[in-house]
Amino acid sequence: MSSVLYLAPRPKLDIHARAHYFEGMQEHTPLTESLEDYLEEIYVLEKKNGSARVKDIAAALHVRYPSVTSALQALTKRGLVNYEPYGLVTLTDEGRIEAVRVTQKHRLLKSFLINVLGLPADIADENACHMEHAISKDVHFRLQQFLKYLHISGCIDADWIVDFQNFCAKDKAAARQKNDLDAYFADSGFSLLPKDE
């Protein structure tokens, strides 16, 4: 007796339903760093000129027109910008909220790097741009609290900043000589987390 294996026919794949499913997923995923940068720049241009143009966005972000068009299409799908080919670009209400969030995070980080760490504005701006995408909401909020505390308590004043800059200048050589953080902080009273964490 031979046995026959019966295979049921495979159901037809509904391509349109599948594409719609993945489109919906894409709209609810977090914004990429790149899309956040586009939103931030559109916000800046909109505040300055009332709207943004593809060529102005491209010039500000040092990208080509097709890259801007692609990003604008993705942001339009998410309901964050109003965009028609060859037309002006504006933020939707939801897009403005998101752009303000990103812009405020950038400004907070840049302020911290300049006013607390004493870094030059260009270095602070470049690093804030990278950091704004990496920190979580909790870290962002705690940094806000820290800066508020420093301001309210009067911890940071002109003397403090000058003292810190003098410390940094003297400490550069010591920091370069000691590559091991544990050795560097050995007698400082500052406790690093254990090495295995």
Image (cartoon, helix red, strand yellow):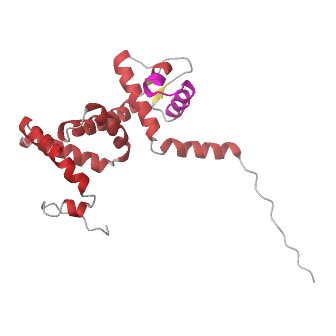
* Image: 19 above or below 184: above
Q: Residue at x 8, y 43 (%)?
A: 155
* Image: 184 above or below 2: above
Residue 82 in sight from this viewpoint: yes
**Quadrant containing the C terminus in the rendered view:** bottom left
Q: Which residues are magenta?
A: 57-76
Q: Could you tell me residue 5's position as x and y percent?
A: 85, 73
Quarter of the image holding residue 153?
top left
Q: Residue at x 8, y 37 (%)?
A: 157
Main secondary structure found in the magenta portion: helix
**In-image side of 154 versus 39 (left or right):** left
Q: In the current view of this chain or complex, which residue is farthest to the bottom?
A: 1
Q: Confirm whether the magenta stretch covers residue 139.
A: no
**In-image side of 166 versus 127 (left or right):** left
Q: Nearer the viewer, residue 163 or 40?
A: 163
Q: Could you tell me residue 48's position as x and y percent?
A: 34, 18
Q: Could you tell me residue 97's position as x and y percent?
A: 35, 33
**In-image side of 145 versus 104 (left or right):** left
Residue 192 in sight from this viewpoint: no
